[in-house]
Image (cartoon, rainbow, N blue to C red):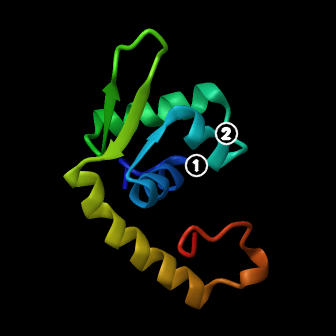
Amino acid sequence: MQMIQGKWKIMILYELAEAGTSRFGKLHRYIKNVSHKTLANQLHQLEEDELISRFDFQTAEPHVEYQLTAKGKSVIPLLDAICDWGDTHVDHALIDRTLCDE
């Protein structure tokens, strides 16, 4: 639970599961309300926990992409199960955004 603890980590994991790979800017636009610093910190923590990989292409313009590792992919079915439980047991009027259906 500590590996996915944090306001934005599950959203990051779901976006990477859906997109395959994603750049920082795309993740920032997807999440919307996260600050640049917080997103960078959450990505760094996910990388330290080996749930995502960071690829720095070292080109003239900075180009970094993130993707799920095998360990990161293995947590997605667990998150899906939690989403399914939430869909069944939580009042939909109380939910701001449903990640399961995106």
Callout 2 amino acid:
Val
Please give the label number shown on residue 7. 1
Please identify, in this view, whether the residue under mark 1 or under mark 2 is nearer the observer.
2
Compare residues 100 and 91 and report the one nearer the observer.
100
Query: Would residue 2 be found to the left or right of residue 23 on screen?
Result: left
Circles 1 and 2: CB atoms closer than 8 Å:
yes
Compare residues 47 and 53 and report the one nearer the observer.
53
Callout 1 amino acid:
Lys
Image quadrant in which the C terminus is located: bottom right
The quarter holding residue 47 reads top left
Instruction: Describe the element under mark 1 as helix, strand or loop.
Output: loop
Q: CA distance from mark 1 to mark 2?
A: 9 Å
Is residue 19 placed above or below 22 in the rendered structure?
below
Residue beneath the point at 64% across and 83% down: 90
Is residue 60 placed above or below 65 in the rendered structure?
above
The percent coordinates of residue 80 (x first, y second) are: 42, 74
Taking the view exactly as shown, the residue that stands out farthest to the front is 60
Is residue 40 placed above or below 58 in the rendered structure?
below
Please give the label number shown on residue 37. none
The percent coordinates of residue 87 (x first, y second) are: 58, 85
Please give the label number shown on residue 34. 2
The percent coordinates of residue 42 (x first, y second) are: 48, 36
Q: Report the label total.
A: 2
Query: Would residue 38 be found to the left or right of residue 57 on screen?
Result: right
Residue beneath the point at 56% across and 48% down: 8
Compare residues 33 and 55 and report the one nearer the observer.
55
